[in-house]
Image (cartoon, grey):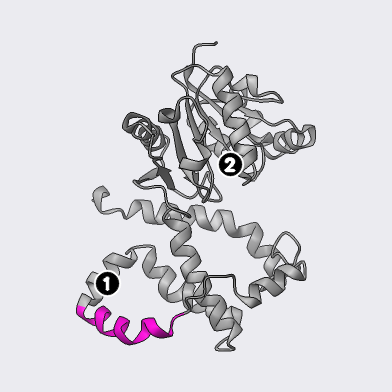
Amino acid sequence: MTEAVSRKLAIIGSGNMGNAIARLFVTNGWHVVLVDPMDDSRARSRERLQVLLTNTAGTQLEWEADLEAASSAGLIIEAAPENKALKQAIFKQLEACCAPSTIIATNTSGLSINELATGLAHPERFVGAHFFTPADIIPLVEVIAGDHTATSTSEHVMQILREIGKLPVLVRKDIPGFIANRLQHALAREAMSLLEKGIASAKDIDTVAKWSLGIRLSLTGPLEQRDINGLDVHHAIASYLYTDLENRVTPSKVLGDKVAQGHFGVKTGQGFYDWTTPERQTALREKDAALRDLVSFLEARKPEKH
């Protein structure tokens, strides 16, 4: 068994998320190996990360097909498809070839950390590290501790993330969807309900979210905002509004209909919007640059920087 190298990262999966995480770590001085058994996936990954290969950072980046290539990494981040059985099989193979000190993290967006760790010989070194798309731009990473995750494991991962410029938060208990997806799905469920009931168009509902909630959420979280507005005011509104909010426990009809029709959004060109129009295509191309500008703006105004 090879001794782990502390600043070597192995990423399992060379899709969009794996590529973005690779870009993030390589530009922060880490050696990264992207492991993917699919030849075409590795080829697309090389093409996507070609800009890194044109400078010195490119010498710190490699692609391999076999999981054995992860054996010398000090940190492994699994970014394979959201399939529990597939991920569990990967983790067991990694345990068989990696050094005892290697930390294994999963980038799952909602699968149970405890369930994914079932069968592992060393669940104390297993942890969730949920990045958000695009992973090299969005600062936040949810670090999720399973029941058997060692405190030293989660603390070490959080320290690594801080060192490369991320903002990690510790999710102390393994719950479905963690924090962000629970908040996101609650908002999306209400938005789809409003659309389904004909209250407003998709564009107008999104406009309300972006230009009222979205702007405030960039600077104050929902609990901060309740304090600012007044908890007495929030309590009074909640007393009559909660009974009218959407609380279904299955996906909405409008969402189910879209999926049944094969309208998955950007990936198929149609969803709640027509993504084939020039305007929507321009918005997609410019989105990452706009996000970078927004993150830079907010970073410069963090209270601790003044």
- The residue closer to the viewer here, 137 or 265, is 265
Disc 1 element: helix
- Quadrant of the drawing holding the N terminus: top right
Write down the residue under mark 2: 20
| Amino acid type indicated by mark 1 | Arg
Tell me which numbered mark, 2 or 1, is placed earlier along the sequence. 2
**In the image as oriented, which residue stretches furthest toward the front?**
119
Closer mark to the observer between disc 2 and disc 1? 1
Highlighted magenta segment, given as a residue range:
232-245
Marks 2/1 in contact by CB < 8 Å: the verdict is no
**Would residue 233 appear left or right of 294 to someone viewing this image?**
left
Q: Name the spot of residue 252 as percent of width and height, x first.
A: 60, 74
Q: Residue at x 58, y 41 (%)?
A: 20
Q: Which residue is tagged 1?
A: 226
Q: Report the amino acid beneath label 2.
A: Ala
In the figure, 122 relative to 180: above or below?
A: above
What residue is at 27 percent from the left and 79 percent from the top?
A: 234
